Amino acid sequence: MVKISITVDGERHEDEVEPRLLLVHYLRERLGKVGTVVGCDTSNCGACTVHLDGNSVKACSVLAVQADGGDVTTIEGLANGEWHPVQAAFKECHGLQCGYCTPGMIMAAVDLLANNPAPSEDEIREGLEGNLCRCTGYQNIVKAVQLAAEGGAR
Ligand code: FES
Ligand code: FES
């Protein structure tokens, strides 16, 4: 076992973990952050996307020990009393169907907009290409990101 110290959604956690434990499993099983979901076993789907030290990462491709000392934000930490503008935009534009991809899609979109506040449609599609939607709701997802970029969601 290895000692780790991670801040998750603003709370510090000191834990002992197996060196092979993936960050996504640490978040879900140890901390109960089940908004971060597992949609594949090949690091392809992006459903597990969280922010680590401000950058989006696939939590299934990071070991919990690699996040030691880091600052993680999950979908559950994104809203701060009220929905984050990207969450509100997804709701307004119907940017989700079954919702399975949505947490990861939103976390990736927030990172995208932090780095490019006024992305073109192509840039949005490129920025989200690591996140798969099995319901193929991409059109409304892109619209939602555009709306969030314009600051238009209520
Ligand atoms: S569960 Fe991480 S990319 Fe699919
Ligand atoms: S809304 Fe169903 S997988 Fe994207």
Image (cartoon, rainbow, N blue to C red):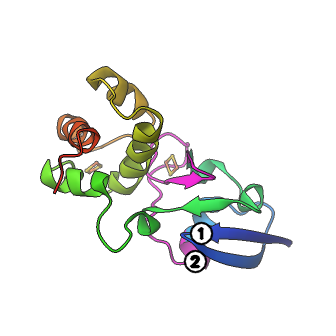
Give yes or no for contact between labels 1 and 2 (Cβ–Cβ under 8 Å).
yes
Dominant SS in magenta: loop
Magenta stretch bounds: 28-56
Q: Residue at horizontal 67%, vertical 76%?
A: 12
Residue ID for mark 1: 8
Q: Position of residue 1 (x, y in %)?
A: 85, 73
Q: Given the image, on which type of amino acid does mark 1 rest?
A: Val
Disc 2 under 8 Å from ligand 1? The reply is no
The residue at which mark 2 appears reads as: 31
Could you tell me how far apart the alpha carbons at marks 1 and 2 are, in whole angstroms?
9 Å
* x and y, in percent, of residue 120 in the image: 30, 23
Q: In the shown orientation, is residue 11 left or right of residue 4?
A: left
Q: Amino acid at mark 2?
A: Leu
Relative to 102, is 42 on the left or the right?
right
Name the residue nearer the viewer: 80 or 109.
Answer: 80
Q: Is residue 50 left or right of residue 61?
A: left
